[in-house]
């Protein structure tokens, strides 16, 4: 395994999962519309943080398109 797709109930906790996976050199795909935060501001901040430091923040539609195209987990 070298890739982690992160979805979850509380975005703020998913951030810790992304951080841990990144430290292990896993490719991180954080699916923003498949998580929920306590506020819109927290959601946006977490997506920005993950996208900047730990992996990629993308939508469910983008993830599905990448999987269909055979690019699952690829970081650019």
Image: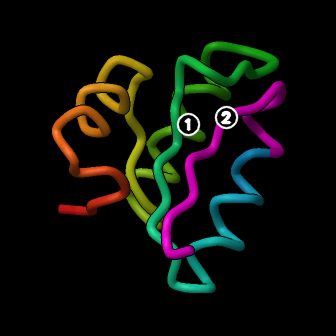
Dot 2: element:
loop
Closest to the observer, 23 or 5: 5
Q: Is residue 66 magenta?
A: no
Q: Residue at x 76, y 31 (%)?
A: 8
> Mark 1 vs mark 2: which is more N-terminal?
2
Q: Is residue 2 magenta?
A: yes
Dot 1 falls on a residue whose secondary structure is helix
Which mark, residue 7? 2
Q: Is residue 21 above or below residue 25?
A: above
Q: Quadrant of the N terminus?
A: bottom right
Viewer-closest of 74 and 52: 74
Q: CA distance from mark 1 to mark 2?
A: 16 Å
User: Quick check: 21 above or below 28?
Assistant: below
- Quarter of image, res 63: top left
* Residue range of the region highlighted in magenta in the rendering: 1-13
- List x then y, in percent, for residue 72: 33, 51
* Residue 17 percent location from the top left of the image: 74, 59
| Rendered location of residue 56, percent (x, y) | 38, 50
Name the residue carrying label 1. 45
Task: Identify the residue shown where x is 17% and y is 62%.
Answer: 76
Residue 61: give x, y in percent of width and height. Answer: 34, 17
Residue 19 higher or lower than 43, as above or below: below
Discs 1/2, front: 2
Q: What label sits on residue 9 in the rendered view?
A: none
* Mark 1 Cα-neighbour bin, 10 Å: few <14, some 14–19, many ≥20: some
């Amino acid at each position: 395994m070298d890739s982690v797709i992160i979805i979850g109930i509380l975005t703020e906790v998913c951030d810790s999962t992304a951080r841990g996976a990144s430290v292990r050199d896993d490719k991180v795909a954080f699916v923003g519309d498949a998580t929920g935060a306590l506020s819109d501001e927290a959601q946006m901040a977490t997506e920005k943080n993950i996208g900047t430091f730990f992996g990629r923040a993308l939508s469910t539609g983008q993830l599905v398109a990448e999987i269909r195209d055979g690019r699952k987990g690829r970081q650019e």
